[in-house]
Image (spheres, grey):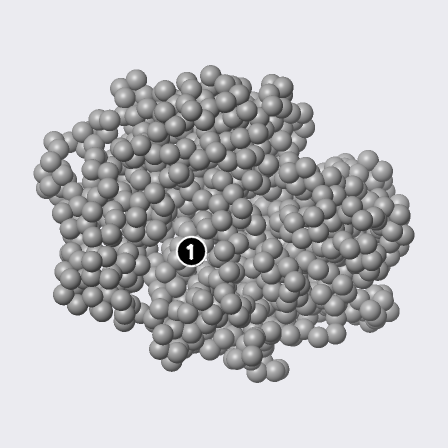
Amino acid sequence: MAEPLIFDLNKDGRRGYALPALDVPALDPADHIPSRFLRQELPLPSLSELEVVRHFTRLSRLNHSVDIGFYPLGSCTMKYNPKVNENMARLPGFAHIHPQQPEETVQGALEMLKTLEDQLAEVTGMDAMTLQPAAGAHGEMTGLLIMKAYHKKQGNHKTKIMIPDSGHGTNPASCSMVGYEVINIKSDARGSIDIEDLKAKLSPDVAGLMITNPSTLGLFDENIGELASLIHSVDGLLYYDGANLNAIMGWTRPGDMGFDIVHLNLHKTFSTPHGGGGPGAGPVGVKKHLEAFLPNPRVVFDGKKYKLQTKCRESVGPVLGSVGNFLVLVRAFAYIMVNGREGLKNASAYAVLNANYMMARLKKTYHLPYDRFCKHEFVLSGKSLAQYGVKTLDVAKRLLDFGFHAPTIYFPMIVEESMMFEPTETESKGTLDCFMEAMEMIAREAAENPDNLKNAPLKTPVRRLDEATAARKPDINYFQRPE
Amino acid sequence: MATYIPTTPDELQEMLGAIGVKSIDDLFAEIPPELRLQGELNLPAGMSESEMARKVARLAETNETVDKNVCFLGGGAYDHIIPAVIDHILLRGDFFTAYTPYQPEVSQGTLQCIYEYQSLICGLTGMDQSNASLYEGATANVEAINMATAQTGRSKVLVLQTLNPEYRRVINTLNGALGVEIVTVPFEDGAVDPSRVQELMNDKIAAVVMQYPNFFGSIEDIERISEIAHAAGALSIVSANPIALGLIEAPGKLGADIVTGEGQPLGIPLSFGGPYLGFIAAKKALLRRMPGRIVGRTKDIDGKIGFVLTLQAREQHIRREKASSNICSNQALMALNATIYMSLLGRDGIKEVAYQSFQKAHYMKRELAKVEGVSFPFTGSFFHELVVKIPNARKVLGKMSKKGVFAGIPLDNWFTSLKDCVLIAVTEKRTKDEIDNYCNMLGGFING
């Protein structure tokens, strides 16, 4: 039976939580607030504590998660989220401090921030960082604002940003948010950026080139040095989308490849949990010549005390109402501390090993569009199953029946019927083997009993959902359900 | 110490063999030598979990907490009582180690929670629809302004000076970057006189952005200001404190077109500023302009009720540069936090948190009035936050902090006209003793 909605569990008069009794003399609010501003109705449910606990516990059991099983979602880096980091984020000295407390009472918090900034700058080869952006997309927007500020100061008239056709959808959306026009650059036969296409489209009004390396195909672009020179030749800036940093930590650094701006996704590379879709953190790093444009406040150390500096004349300004998603940052800080320099390098080493191990076997069963060593992820095409009337979507749904999460599907868009796998370093060979057996069994099923795939999933809490009706007649608020 | 990698040396050899290489290094061979990192990262060596935990705990202990001190700080983040139940549920790996519900068949837990969250936010704000949440309170206004400019085709907004000054700065950064012209409407007596909005209103204005209760704790006349906005074809955007809405009327009933806010008061720890929860809810006509994720209820092929991400044609992964926003994620876990809080406290509980906060703030004002030298620059109605003028305020605040009382936020941080004025927040968590002690201590420092 489906779990009822919280509203359907309502019982007027029930209480789930008792506050301490009011210990000051009470006034009549009607004497102090004009009556038109006094609340009339408050349509919230009333439940007991146990009912609330059971409701959400039951709901939790309907989710797949990293703690339950393999989650090879490409470009999302669903690695293990160490439990101890949750403890660190719940230390009262971090969780129970107010953002407006006097600076002398939060020195430890500021020290943590400064240390993490320095560590992330080292990992990426950048000169300065801001930890303020709350997510990758937010980091992108921040990085692009910095780019804009730089060009303004240079007196450059720049209106366009180049993005490869394999780029994340967020990239062009972020460009629009800051008022840049997007130029799409093609990929070549090896899955790298087509340099000739880039050269043909390069002009003085190009503000920058925004790429991931390795790309969303999981492939390292060896031409990155030349790309950097090209973009710098028009005083453009090279922007690094850090979604794929888990492939290269300790092996190479965006800063050394010629990137000027980097954003990271701490919820990917640095193991902070995805939380069902957030909160994340999207720090941004820059080279020296862009440091002055970083958002404020900046954390500074004057030799004795840590301070939040708000007066930074050239800063693009704050991009969030606080110093950042602080407790997410604490988790990343703990992760870096445990791993250290060797551990981070190993994380990337084994992430790349696992991806290549899977790719080497699965390419025998599924089409591999770019047959070369991958980095932390790789992309297969499900097009060979089309002869049985089976789509990539069906493969994804069938995987759910085996207790696995599906890969990222239909992205990147340059590969037909694409499936993007990212195993991460924290999965064992045994898990990868089981998963690949399932992938192979599914390929056999496609030929022998395609309906099994088209009807999948069969064993999940619900089966395929009617998304068309959901969009046509939106039922998104319990209080206003369509007829 | 790479304790999170399970691969044994034997397995490593087998895997390398299957790939057809001798070592992991071979898999990185395509990185041009001149781009490879020479040597190691300049970071400390790794350590065990217990060593790390000890070091991090030591660092955390150097901070002064609101547990050991008494917190009268607000300004957008409030020290409310947080029920124990919440964290136990948040710590279920099924919630916090899941990702975005891309495969709805195995994400019904997250999806139903978001549907409930959206509905609770609608109920609280009196609006027709909510998204699945945004980063936090400041950026929620940025998204609301983007909606308003897109909807009206106008590029100028009026922002009341009584909107949280940190939010105003973020609006300047982010909306300013898109060429939105931001006009600030000044306050008098702790709130904005609607006639000032009327004077600045014209058919170039996309929206008026206001806060309710406003940054000073005063109850802004959002009803009258919304009327003025509507008469000129502009939208009314209200940034509301969700707890206050247990006592004061829903903005949806007072003319708001978009309600945003900071969800931190709904059971989220202070956390030095984040992660918090941005909420945004709007009237029906604005549905296709909403940023970020939205969850809808539907049925599966067996006719069973289920939930999905819906109306995705607005979003970046489909629309790319034409998306309504670049937002990908939401703050799902913080939305869950708020959902559990609202469910547990329930209708009567939220009302009581609001009622007690109101009562204690008003008690505090009466007690402060008895302290010689203290005065109140503003006279209007307020909820649980008030502005107090204290001689040599910064010095006094410093002394009180040393005695374990975070006594308020100095307003001259942002308002040069408010020298020696302090913003004080009083929640249901404060006790009569703490308030009395505050007033005694304050009297001692002012007059001692």
Q: Is residue A75 left or right of residue B440?
A: left
The subunit letter for the residue under badge 1 reads B
The image quadrant where one finds the N terminus of chain A is: bottom left
What residue is at 59 percent from the left and 36 percent from the top? A179
What residue is at 35 percent from the left and 30 percent from the top? A193
Relative to A56, does residue A155 appear above or below in the rendering? above
Percent of width and height locating residue B264? 60, 55
Q: Is there any visible trace of residue B64 in the rendered image?
A: no
Relative to B239, does residue A216 appear above or below in the rendering? above
Front-most of residues B339 and B148:
B148
Q: Secondary structure at mark 1?
A: loop
Q: Is residue B126 left or right of residue A471?
A: right
Relative to A5, does residue B402 appear above or below in the rendering? above
Percent of width and height locating residue B178? 64, 38
The image quadrant where one finds the C terminus of chain A is: bottom right
What residue is at 17 percent from the left and 68 percent from the top? A449
In which quadrant of the rendered view does residue A290 lie? top right
Image label count: 1
Q: Identify the amino acid type marked 1.
A: Thr
Percent of width and height locating residue A253? 36, 26
Front-most of residues A301 and B196:
B196
Decide: few, some or many residues near mark 1? Use Cα within 10 Å; few <14, some 14-19, many ≥20: many
The residue to which callout 1 is attached is B100
What residue is at 36 percent from the left and 72 percent from the top? A462
Q: Is there any visible trace of residue A34 in the rendered image?
A: yes
Q: Is residue B27 left or right of residue A179?
A: left
Percent of width and height locating residue B131? 56, 59
Front-most of residues B372 and B210:
B210
